[in-house]
Image (tube, rainbow, N blue to C red):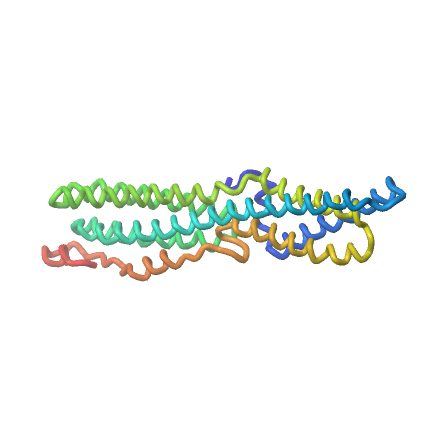
Amino acid sequence: MWTESAAADWVYRLPVWAEWIGIFVLLVLAYRLGALLQRLLLREPCTESETALVGSAMALLAFIIAFTFSMALNRYDQRRDIVLAEANSIGTTYLRAKLAPEPLRSEMLRIIVRYTDTRLALFDTNEDPDALNRLQAASRAELALLWDATARAVKAIEPPTLAASLVQTVNETTDLAESRRTTYVVRLPRAVMFALVGFAMIAAGVSGFARGGRRHFALSLFVYAMLASAIALVIDLDRPSAGAIRLVPGPLVHTRAGMAAPVVLAPAEATPSAAGADP
């Protein structure tokens, strides 16, 4: 599971415009409900001191939106930093794998290239849980093959300090793969997102109850459009591979572009000089 609940998974896969429309409609309905209750329960308009509560409700809502937006932006920055760190680790692993003798060198380079392609494919999943799980399983399989090849290569690499550096960077690549997976799983708590929408609806209802006139309703539509945009932006920031705001795979693309396709030598061609050359 890539999200905390089926409901959250469904929300995260909606396009941004659908999220905006849904939130905007909920706010308008809450306003109309508040205006209806005002007409049914009160026979006189609210006083100025009572309508001042609307400003307090909106101020509290603005604070909650700002807090939630900050959380989503921090998570976005964290995901972006992990992508950069992963690209650097994969690139270093690719270079240090050239220290291994043939045929282990070509085998490791092929595995690293396939692994990099798999990590790049994660950017195009559009929050599809089946595709995400499939690519993560492929990543784990490639890392297992890489570790197996590394365990065989370190026995043939001299001096041992170079072998230790290869093990270190392969270990970092594995750790960063798990860190990146975790950043996909850990989203803003669904309770926070639902509470944010709920608070916005309450504020809209209070506004309708305090001032339910036509002129006030027309002006409120602009405010609710901005509120819907802000909340939709928070949700979109929390989706790393879907929506309008996505992580940029630039560092991994650059790393992949620097990888040459490894050459597999036939046994008769594996002369000492060829075995020591870079593919």
**Would residue 37 appear left or right of 115 to someone viewing this image?**
right
**Would residue 226 appear left or right of 124 to someone viewing this image?**
right
Q: Residue at x 54, y 55 (%)?
A: 243
Q: Which corner quadrant of the image does residue 120 belong to?
A: bottom left
User: Is 190 or 262 nearer to us in this picture?
Assistant: 190
The answer to whether residue 95 shows anywhere in this view is yes
- The quarter of the image holding the C terminus is bottom left
User: Is 250 or 65 nearer to us in this picture?
Assistant: 65
x and y, in percent, of residue 266 in the image: 18, 56
**Would residue 185 appear left or right of 64 to someone viewing this image?**
left
Q: Which corner quadrant of the image does residue 176 belong to?
A: top left
Q: Residue at x 39, y 46 (%)?
A: 138
Q: Residue at x 63, y 52 (%)?
A: 19
**Would residue 137 appear left or right of 104 to someone viewing this image?**
right
Extreme residue in the left direction: 272
Please count the marks in the image.
0
Extreme residue in the front direction: 49
x and y, in percent, of residue 99 in the image: 17, 51
User: Is 59 or 145 nearer to us in this picture?
Assistant: 59
Q: Residue at x 31, y 52 (%)?
A: 88
Extreme residue in the right direction: 43
x and y, in percent, of residue 234 in the image: 56, 50
The answer to whether residue 115 shows anywhere in this view is no
x and y, in percent, of residue 103 in the image: 19, 51
